[in-house]
Amino acid sequence: MSRLRPFLCKFCQENFHTFDRLKCHTNRHMIKYVRANARANAARNLHEHSMIHGKEQIYQCGYCQEFFKKISKLQNHIRTHFIDKLYQCEQCQKCFSWESQLRLHVRTHTKEKLFQCEYCQKGFARRNNLKIHIRTHTKEKPYQCHHCQKNFGRSNTLKEHMIRTHTKEKTYQCEYCQKCFSCQSRLTHHINTHTKPFQCEHCQKCFARSSKLKEHMRTHTQEKPYQCEYCQKCFPYQDSLTKHIRTHIQEKPYQCEYCQKCFSWQSNLTQHITTHTKEKPYQCKHCQKCYTRSTTLKQHMRTHTKEKPYQCEYCQKCFPYKDSLTKHIRTHIQEKPSV
């Protein structure tokens, strides 16, 4: 590559002084490529796309098989296969083909959310995400299945519905376990359960989803971003806050089908139901004794393992049960048990 012309066209190997000149030159290749392939791709994929918008055409990239509704979108996408990713994020060094892509990415670091919902004031980094979110308020569902007339808020949700419900096709196969899926997104999520690509920088524990890693990081940072509006107590997870709030509002959404008694927690309901069914699902592998609660079985197991996890801070004597330790500590502090 010439030092005076460092920007190389990967179509024809011609060099250019600036990246802008390379972009203009590449456009000519794009137009030729798209016009040559769009008609064939539209015919090949017309049946699949008709599931979403009737007879509207769709255009497919010949390199990665991604679909686009407009030739201009396909044209911009194809550049990503041939133009070097010259725009680099200063914070994580990830590279992009377009400056606009970099600007959007930077918002994942700055948490900048320029687009705000007029109904609930929730912010979004992308206009399209706001548009999709607003449908949760307006209940708009513009995408309709022509088989069962069911409506959907997103086109990809309709496509998944068509494949899962009507065509029953599962064309995406996992290379690790050969399990098949109806769409690429489900396969991608599944493959992550094998590869666990998201790793904690503190303890090297790996996760299948970035959201799980984000939650795990709070065990290191001690961050508690969810605050109770009643008592200002903070929690690291949204579900922990939701459960806590029920102690204030006395909400008990879980009802027993046998006696109609209600509970704040699913686990409490599950435990309660065993009083009706007499079921004891937790069995000791040593003596086959059964229990209704996993915690009771765990305590029982200590009679076999001789484990004593509770240690006295005064004399370092150990005990198998917490209540045994509590009673013992009273001998040190001379506390009399309450009557």
Image (cartoon, rainbow, N blue to C red):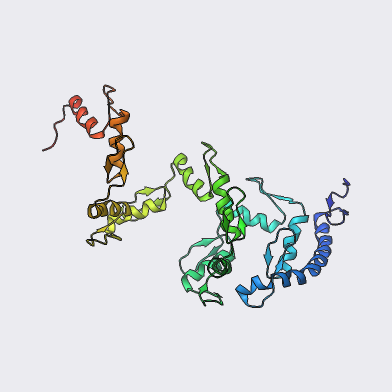
Relative height, residue 197 to residue 183 (above, below)? above
Task: Return the x and y of residue 331 as percentages of the image width and height.
Answer: 18, 25
Q: Is residue 127 above or below residue 200?
A: below
Q: Nearer the viewer, residue 108 or 206?
A: 206
Q: Residue at x 16, y 27 (%)?
A: 334
Task: Locate residue 76 relative to residue 316 in the image: left or right.
Answer: right
15 or 54: nearer the viewer: 54
Residue at horizontal 27%, vertical 39%? 289
Foreground residue, 118 or 93?
93
Which residue reaches farthest left? 339
Q: Position of residue 162 (x, y in %)?
A: 56, 69
**Residue 307, quarter of picture:** top left
Q: Can residue 278 be spotted in the picture?
A: yes
Left or right: 311 with respect to 124?
A: left
> Which percent across, then down, holds residue 83?
77, 54
Q: Give the residue displayed 81% in from the left and 65% down from the top.
A: 33
* Residue 309 can be seen in this image: no
Quadrant (top left, top right, bottom left, bottom right) of the C terminus: top left
Return the x and y of residue 201 as percentages of the image width and height.
Answer: 55, 38
